[in-house]
Amino acid sequence: MSPDIGARRVGRTGKPSPTPPSDPDRVASLHQLAVVIVNYESGEALARCAEGLHAEGVAEMVVVDNGSSDGSLAELRRRLPGVEVLVTGRNLGYGPAANRGVAATSAPSVLVCNPDLVVHAGALSVLEGVLEDDPGCALVGPLIRTSEGDRYPSARQFPSMVDAAGHALFGIFAPDNRFTHAYHQSRLESPDGVPRVVDWVSGACFLVRRSAFEQVGGFDESYFMYAEDVDLCWRLGRAGWTVAYATAAEVTHLQGISTDRHPFRMIYEHHRSLLRFAGRSSEGWRRALLPLVALGIGARALLACLAQVSRSRPAATEAPDHRL
């Protein structure tokens, strides 16, 4: 990791900020973990997320801002003036920004998350308990729900090549196909809430053991966005650690607040990251298939662009919006 390159520290309290007077008993249940929120153009969602985590009583909190110009930092400072902010000056990408945030904290475990999250009551305690109970577990993710309350497929095993290829080809226009169902692996949701070992969890929200994170060098900064979480979990597994999924811990992810601003850039970065991870993780005879994998990823990127154009085109019956 390169913790301080490109980041400017704006403000820090030096100790946990006092809990709001409306709930004075929260201080007694302080969570001995740090929080790193990676922000880019997330609007009011950033302050809402930070306030919620602050109210839970976390030991440290750092917001890493990737060059936002939407007023999200001003709103954060107005509502939580004591929170530490690292300003990178430009959009470094999710993993590089998270690395700088983790390096700016000292707690033995770190919650890394998006700014458009609502962490449900008790979720932090569940995640902390998983790491405390299993010294071999490096990282644990919660059950992530959409704003509609649906389960988001945030924890998965590495898919078979057949399921991955089928999902890539059919998942955009026919999301109910059997390959996509197998790829998303809804069976991983445990009704009894018992944590289970998985191959990877979403980088939108996870708690990681600092020693494990540092051992593998944190996020690979060659990923701008997407698949950096898969890559991190893959490297942790190769280093002998396990990754867990704890459905008893829940968060709600609003999704797309910043990425929807630049859809075609995100499509490009998504598929570039998929190709990079495929090249890194393919071994043995599978490496011979990489040219076909590259063609499939390129085809999927084209389909994704066509789908985005289709979604963006106004219906013929709609009057044009002259405010745009």
Image (cartoon, helix red, strand yellow):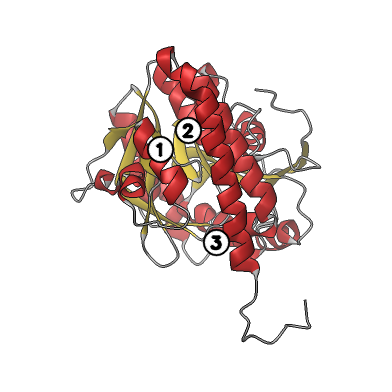
Question: Which class describes the residues within 10 Å of circle 3: few (<14), some (14-19), or many (20+)?
Answer: few
Of 254 and 12, nearer the camera is: 254
User: What separation in Å lies between label 2 and label 3 (alpha carbons)?
Assistant: 37 Å
Residue 87: which quarter of the image? top right
For residue 171, say whether it is visible: yes
Q: Position of residue 95 (x, y in %)?
A: 61, 35
Q: Amino acid at mark 1?
A: Ala
User: What separation in Å lies between label 3 and label 1 (alpha carbons)?
Assistant: 47 Å
Which badge, 2 or 3, is on the more N-terminal residue?
3
Of the numbered discs in the image, which one, if any, rests on residue 20? 3
Which badge, 3 or 1, is on the more N-terminal residue?
3
Q: Which residue is the site of mark 1?
A: 164
Q: Amino acid at mark 3?
A: Pro
Which badge, 1 or 2, is on the more N-terminal residue?
1
User: What separation in Å lies between label 1 and label 2 (alpha carbons)?
Assistant: 14 Å
For residue 39, say whether it is visible: no
Residue 48: which quarter of the image? bottom right
Q: Which residue is the site of mark 2?
A: 230
Q: Position of residue 255 (x, y in %)?
A: 53, 57
Q: Amino acid at mark 2?
A: Val
Residue at disc 2, secondary structure: helix
For the C terminus, the quadrant is bottom right
